Image (tube, grey):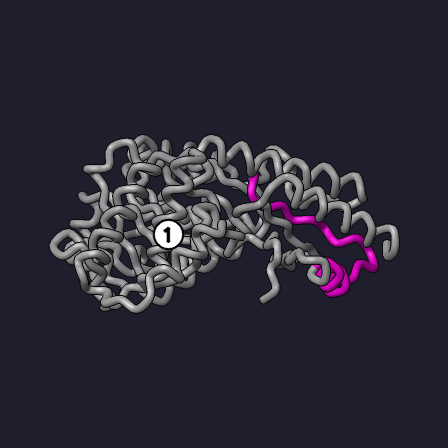
């Protein structure tokens, strides 16, 4: 099997120990006590990494993608919920779609694919026309563009106007310093891959217990409160868990504890700056300014007469996988720097990019 350095925004490259964890499991019954022990360790490690007051929160694990975790929250909101959905990319639009499908009262504040104007968010909250909002939903790192949104400012507004905060942290949790208790985040959604550096397949929700008690089920599989209650009683998922993926996740979480979130942030930041600086030198313009760009993914505007498919194939032939752009206007491509990636990997990659440019640009 070919081994690639993945410079896409997830799934990410994993360590050998994470990959081997899946092979060590073998054939198991997922309802045995060992699986309960495994999920309990995962739950506790996630709370330890993301919450300074873990007793106030529950970790809910779902056999799903990260989108499944977000949809479990949206589909479980109380009957009376009225959501202000802050959108500045396709993943915020995905939440819009969920709110529409479940017929949940909501309003979209759309910044297209730019930076969120916090003053406009407050203006919307202040001037809510027929009833106050109960919830605010926002993407922390919008991987459509790579922009990082200021959830601390949004959290302050949520507290000021009495709203519960829903954060999609797929591309920020486990590297950015997040504390759901300190930031008054009622629901934080992430997954078993990306920045935690595990394998894809587990959707994760960190939910405040008082908020869980108010949830309403609109689905069977994604019923957030029922899953939380079931795990408390049995230390099991309600439906069949992917034990091999869980086994990889617990190893990834142990590795995270060794590296530390602060050090992971610094490592990603350094790799990101290496990529951004060299790409700019080679004539590629970043879509988002440095101040508002995340440390994990950067979108670059395609130059005139640039052939992304040819560029992608050239790099893949040399062991690197990159991602096309997703913005609605204009052509872009994305370079991510998450996972088990080292400086020497990025140096080799950038040398290939430079060689490509000399031959084709």
Q: Tell me where residue 44 appears, x and y as whole percent.
A: 26, 43
Q: Quadrant of the C terminus?
A: bottom right
208 vs 280, left or right, is left
Q: In this orientation, which residue lies closer to the viewer: 9 or 235? A: 235
Q: Is residue 161 visible?
A: no
Where residue 73 appears, x then y in whole percent?
Answer: 30, 55
- Residue at the spot 52% in from the left edge and 40% down from the top edge: 148
Quarter of the rendering occupied by the N terminus: bottom right
* Residue 191 coordinates in the image, percent (x, y): 39, 53
For disc 1, the marked residue is: 249
Query: Residue 126 at what x, y percent from top left?
Result: 37, 37
Q: Secondary structure at mark 1?
A: helix
- Within the magenta stretch, is there residue 296? yes
* Crowding near the residue tagged with mark 1, few <14, some 14–19, many ≥20 C-alpha atoms within 10 Å: many
**Residue 114, image quadrant:** top right
318 falls in the magenta region: no
Asked if residue 292 is positioned above or below residue 305 in the image, the reply reads above
Magenta part of the protein: which range?
A: 295-315
Q: Nearer the viewer, residue 154 or 50?
A: 50
| Residue 238 falls left or right of residue 203 | left
Quarter holding residue 79: bottom left
Q: Nearer the viewer, residue 228 or 356?
A: 356
In the rendered image, is residue 146 in sight?
yes
x 35%, y 44%: residue: 128
Question: In this view of the protein, which residue sits in the foreground, 107 or 144?
Answer: 144
* Left or right, residue 320 beside residue 242: right
Q: Residue at x 55, y 35 (%)?
A: 267
The residue depicted at 49 percent of the width and 40 percent of the height is 149
């Amino acid at each position: 099997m070919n081994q690639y350095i993945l410079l896409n925004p997830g799934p990410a490259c994993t360590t050998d120990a994470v990959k081997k964890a899946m092979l060590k499991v073998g054939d198991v019954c997922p309802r045995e006590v060992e699986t309960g022990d495994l999920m309990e360790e995962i739950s506790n490690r996630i709370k330890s990494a993301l919450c300074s007051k873990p007793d106030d929160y529950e970790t809910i694990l779902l056999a799903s993608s990260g989108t499944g975790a977000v949809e479990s929250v949206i589909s479980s909101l109380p009957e009376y919920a009225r959501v202000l959905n802050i959108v500045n990319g396709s993943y915020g639009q995905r939440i819009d779609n969920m709110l529409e499908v479940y017929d949940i009262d909501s309003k979209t504040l759309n910044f297209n694919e730019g930076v969120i104007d916090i003053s406009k968010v407050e203006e919307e909250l202040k001037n809510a026309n027929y009833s106050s909002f109960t919830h605010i939903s926002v993407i922390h790192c919008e991987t459509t563009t790579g922009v990082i949104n200021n959830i601390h400012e949004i959290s302050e507004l949520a507290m000021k106007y009495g709203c519960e905060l829903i954060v999609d942290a797929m591309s920020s949790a486990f590297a950015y310093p997040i504390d759901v208790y300190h930031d008054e985040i009622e629901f934080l959604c992430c997954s078993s891959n990306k920045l935690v550096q595990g394998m894809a397949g587990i959707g994760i929700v960190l939910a405040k217990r008082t908020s869980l008690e108010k949830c309403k089920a609109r689905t069977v599989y994604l019923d957030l409160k029922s899953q939380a209650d079931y795990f408390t009683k049995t230390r099991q998922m309600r439906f069949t868990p992917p034990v091999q993926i869980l086994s990889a996740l617990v190893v990834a979480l142990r590795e995270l504890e060794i590296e530390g979130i602060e050090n992971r942030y610094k490592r990603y930041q350094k790799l990101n700056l290496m990529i951004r600086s060299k790409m700019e030198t080679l004539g590629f313009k970043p879509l988002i300014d440095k101040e508002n760009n995340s440390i994990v993914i950067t979108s670059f505007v395609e130059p005139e007469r640039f052939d992304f498919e040819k560029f992608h194939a050239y790099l893949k032939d040399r062991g690197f996988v990159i991602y096309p752009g997703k913005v609605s206007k204009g052509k872009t491509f994305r370079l991510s720097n998450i996972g088990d990636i080292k400086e020497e990997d990025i140096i080799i990659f950038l040398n290939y990019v430079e060689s490509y440019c000399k031959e084709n640009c």
